[in-house]
Image (tube, rainbow, N blue to C red):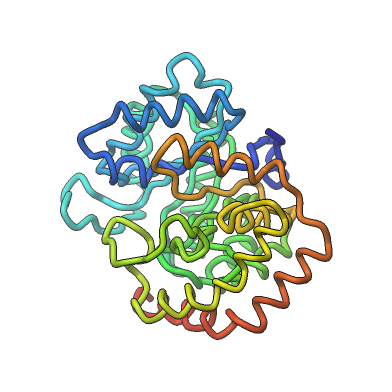
Amino acid sequence: MLLRDLGHTGIKTSELGIGMWTLVTDWWGEPDKAQEIVRRAIELGINFFDTADMYGNGRAEEVLGRSLGSKRDKVVILTKVGYDFYSSPQRPRQRFDLDYLRTAVDRSLKRLSTNYVDILMIHNPKMKDITRRDLLDFMRSLKSDGIARAVGVALGPTLGWEDEGLKAIEMGYEALEHIFNLIELYPGLRFLEFDVGHIVRVPHASDVLNESKWPLNYDPKLHRHFKSQQWINTAVDRTKGLLDYASKLGVTLSQLALSFVLSHKRVSTVIPNITTVRELEEFVKSTEFVLNNDDVNFLMDYYERNYRDLNEESIKETQAYK
């Protein structure tokens, strides 16, 4: 699998990455299945693994650490801190005070069975924390101490956060994790104007762009629980016109969606929801297919005709979290 630059950090990431969130939420009591996917991913050339301390209240980091074993130095680990699930496991609250963050980082390293992470991010911070110079200095001090190779900001939980993402770049954070897909192009396209690391999540737009998941119903474990069922239904209806286009190209709709994200050269890696080895192997094939300019232009036009209003509606979801 091809590797891409994570901005100017010197870190090389596989075009496709593995997100641990779905693995631990789907298989709460079956870590062996998650480990099977991690190990198969490495066999297929994937080196990028995205996790966070709060995923499964630490379980995701533990599973990843066990799965990697002696392969630690051959992979890139991104983890995130900023939610205190230790004092409130059922309803973690955000905490970005430096004493807490240092403790959280130490505990993450222990669960991951490593003495460093490649990318450390603050998890879904608001503007007041993104603009804190002491917080940025703390994150940079972890680089100086060899605990993190790069530092960044994970935006969320919803789409949007344009002002926050742009401010993080202005402050000097080296990478962003954000939502970007054919239905929800903005604000991702705005972020991609900047030469920093870009870790893209939700590339299938809450599974609307993955026909194998249709019909789509409410699921509290998945990102689409942020969406109204009306949004989901409308988006699926408007997406059916892409099935024939994907078929003519010899790919599935879900592969087309990933190839579209990867057609943007500043994307460092994309992390789809993967729950089975079969899904993993299908998505890996999307990295072998490169869209030409005519294909990308067709899809951009399709967005304008079918998705722009849905994109704008998604951005409004953010207001509930500000």
| Whether residue 139 is situated above or below residue 300 in the rendered picture | above
Position of residue 61 measured from the top left corner of the image (x, y, whole percent): 35, 34
User: On the image, which quarter does residue 157 sit in?
Assistant: bottom left
Position of residue 265 measured from the top left corner of the image (x, y, whole percent): 75, 53
Could you tell me which residue is drawn at 48 percent across and 54 percent down? 134
Could you tell me which residue is drawn at 20 percent across and 44 percent down? 86
Could you tell me which residue is drawn at 61 percent across and 28 percent down? 45
The answer to which of 221 and 153 lies nearer the viewer is 221
Quadrant location, the C terminus:
bottom left
Q: Is residue 254 visible?
A: yes
The answer to which of 23 and 74 lies nearer the viewer is 23
| Whether residue 30 is situated above or below residue 243 in the rendered picture | above
Q: Is residue 78 visible?
A: no
Q: Residue furthest right?
A: 293
Q: Residue furthest top?
A: 70
Q: How many marks?
A: 0
Could you tell me which residue is drawn at 50 percent across and 72 percent down? 160
Position of residue 27 measured from the top left corner of the image (x, y, whole percent): 27, 39
Position of residue 60 measured from the top left corner of the image (x, y, whole percent): 33, 37
Quadrant location, the N terminus:
top right
| Whether residue 15 is situated above or below residue 63 in the rendered picture | below
